[in-house]
Image (spheres, helix red, strand yellow):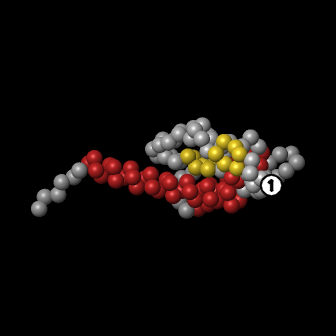
Amino acid sequence: MPVEWNEKKVNEMIARGLRDTLVQGAALAEAEAKRACPVRTGRLKNSIHAVLPDSFDSSYPYTDDQGRAYDGALEMGTKPTEAIVGTNVEYAFWVEAGTSRMQGRHYLRHALEVLASKGWEVKFGP
């Protein structure tokens, strides 16, 4: 019995598998970043989220631990082969990197290190 190769169907299956894998990696990175994030008001921790493959992040409503509402949209899109985990909180960089008065808390770096230890290719920054 001859076997027919349906290239379109195979490519769709590969793309679906890649997307599912990227979604899993983004969920892990988001969870690890939130777990390692220092908390004072909860705003930074609650703002961390993933932009999934082939999408645009135009709105991400969240609240801090006191119930104040914010929009955490990263205002960026992803390609079908990438996912982004981040925050738009203005002081997030300083918490991550530190200042002259405070040591960096490396919550995002921690998330990337966890992914890298599991064999993921990761990139820090834009």
Question: What secondary structure is found at the residue carrying circle 1?
Answer: loop
Residue indicated by mark 1 = 40
Residue at point 44%, 51% (across, down): 19
The percent coordinates of residue 99 (x first, y second) are: 83, 46
Quick check: can you spot residue 115?
no
In the drawing, does residue 24 fall left or right of residue 8?
A: right
The percent coordinates of residue 125 (x first, y second) are: 64, 43
Few, some or many residues within 10 Å of mark 1 (<14, 14–19, 20+): few
- Three-letter amino acid code at the position of disc 1: Arg
The percent coordinates of residue 54 (x first, y second) are: 47, 43
Q: Which residue ends up furthest to the front in the rendered image?
A: 67
The percent coordinates of residue 46 (x first, y second) are: 69, 52
Residue at point 66%, 43% (across, down): 72
Q: Quadrant of the C terminus?
A: top right
For residue 60, what is the image quadrant? top right
Residue at point 49%, 46% (across, down): 53
103 or 12, nearer to the observer = 12
Count of marks, rendered view: 1
125 or 48, nearer to the observer = 48
Q: Quadrant of the N terminus?
A: bottom left
Quick check: can you spot residue 122?
yes
For residue 93, what is the image quadrant? top right
Residue at point 70%, 50% (across, down): 63
72 or 120, nearer to the observer = 72
Q: Which residue ends up furthest to the right in the rendered image?
A: 101
- As drawn, 61 above or below 29: above
In the drawing, does residue 119 fall left or right of residue 39?
A: left
